[in-house]
Image: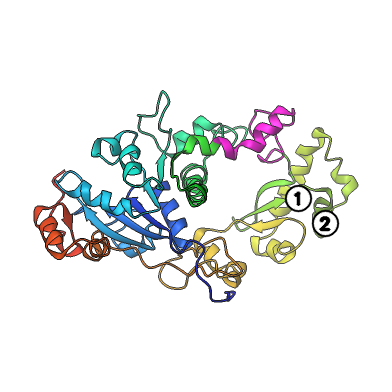
Amino acid sequence: MTEFPSAAPPLEGIRIVEFTGLGPGPFAGMMLADMGAEIIRIDRPGSGISPSVGATDPTLDYLARGRRSVALNLKAPGAVDVALRLIKDADGLIEGFRPGVMERLGLGPDVALSCNPRLVYGRMTGWGQTGPVSAAAGHDLNYIALSGALWASGSADGPPAFPLNLLGDFGGGGMFLAYGMLAGFLKAARTGQGDVIDAAICDGMSTLMAMIHSQRAMGKWRDTRQSNSLDGGVPWYGVYECADGGWITIGALEPQFWARLLDLLRLDPAQMGDRSDRSTWAAMRATLSALFLSQSRDHWCALLEGTDACFAPVLSPAEAASHPHNLARGVFAQGPGDQPMPAPRFAHSQTPLPAKPPLPGADSRSVLVDAGFAAEEIAALVQSGAVACATDHSEEDPS
């Protein structure tokens, strides 16, 4: 891994209170923690581990890394006051509940910003805080469906295909929340005034589709699956099967890369035909399909990888962690599991792997001490059930 000069992480000094949730919210928190932000996660007592993965070993819940945890029963007397005291000294807040939940708890934006006007209050939902379906349940697949992204993915003769929950939860959701929080921090530093970030996966997905909408506006995009240059409609941008059952990708969009591919494959450009003529595409695809199916994936890697043919093998998650390029760049951390390292990288700031995810309530006492709570206050809060510690997991959340 490349060694960077010793320097503070980019977000050192930023403090965020995160109300634990699912998927995109914790992912945004992970991104900010990876960049050095101090994040205090508010968990439910007795929750066992963070729910973002549901694993039995909390140290493997990578989305929850880099936090300290305080366990609060927000329906118990005094717990909301504890949360507000933490929020008062924070730069940001992240929550991923349905619209109205934080307001009903007494922790909505109006209350939070009244006690901390410079607070950046980040809200993560699928549909958004407003709109006809904002109160309905949903998941990644539903959100990318509404955005138009799902329609454009998949083969022409099959149903729309979805790429895990990467597009919605993490691309259109968590990343946009993290981006919004950073913009909010800059505004607060400049003006002293915080803001409320309404990060909706549907909104983020529509932004991710900006180039497609631009091509549609210019008449360069067909609303038919697998009929465009970037949706598998052209034979020089697609996935091909190999003799051993493996798969490879070709992305030779530009003429010079297409020429390089044909040269390496020893195919005659004249016989392959004119790429601007759609009538030639079926024959081109058939030629490439038959050729790639004649040899193993390793054969094509040896011939094409690292060239300007725009090539890469299709790797399983396990294979990706051991690929020479990823090993050389230190993309994954060493140790149990294949934990991705923080990204992006900085030339003059360190972004080391954050601390392992904590048990809920593991830091309850230390967080409250740092927030100025006296020992007798903490003891009373624990005794009342408003606060729980990691060793107090026999105390189930009465809610």
State the extent of the magenta-drawn residues as a range.
Answer: 206-233
Q: Position of residue 195 (x, y in %)?
A: 44, 42
Which quarter of the rendering shows the C terminus? top left
Name the residue nearer the viewer: 253 or 280.
Answer: 253
At 38% across and 55% down in the image, what residue appears?
Answer: 16
Mark 2 lies on residue: 260
Q: Is 221 inside the magenta-drawn segment? A: yes
Q: Identify the residue position indicated by label 1 in the image.
A: 252
Q: Position of residue 328 (x, y in %)?
A: 60, 72
Residue density around tag 1, few if under 14, some if 14–19, many if 20 or more, within 10 Å: many
Residue located at (25% from left, 35% from top) = 104
Q: Could you tell me which secondary element the residue under label 1 belongs to?
A: loop
Residue 368's disc number: none
Instruction: Find residue 229 and report its horizontal and vertical position in percent.
Output: 72, 39
Tag 2: amino acid: Arg
Tell me the residue at 32%/55% (across/down): 41
- Secondary structure beneath disc 2? helix
Q: Viewer-proximal residue, 135 or 226?
A: 135
- Total count of labels: 2
Vertical comparison of 11 with 102: above or below:
below
Mark 2 neighbour density, 10 Å: few (under 14) some (14–19) many (20 or more): some
361 relative position to 173: left or right: left
Q: Quadrant of residue 260?
A: bottom right
Q: Would you say 264 lies left or right of 389 here?
A: right
Q: Which comes sooner in the sequence, label 2 or label 1?
A: 1
Q: Is residue 345 above or below residue 7?
A: above
**Residue at (88%, 49%) from the top-left corner?**
269
Disc 2 vs disc 1: Cβ atoms closer than 8 Å?
A: yes
Q: Is residue 86 above or below residue 232?
A: below
Q: Is residue 251 magenta?
A: no
Residue at the front extreme of this rendering: 191
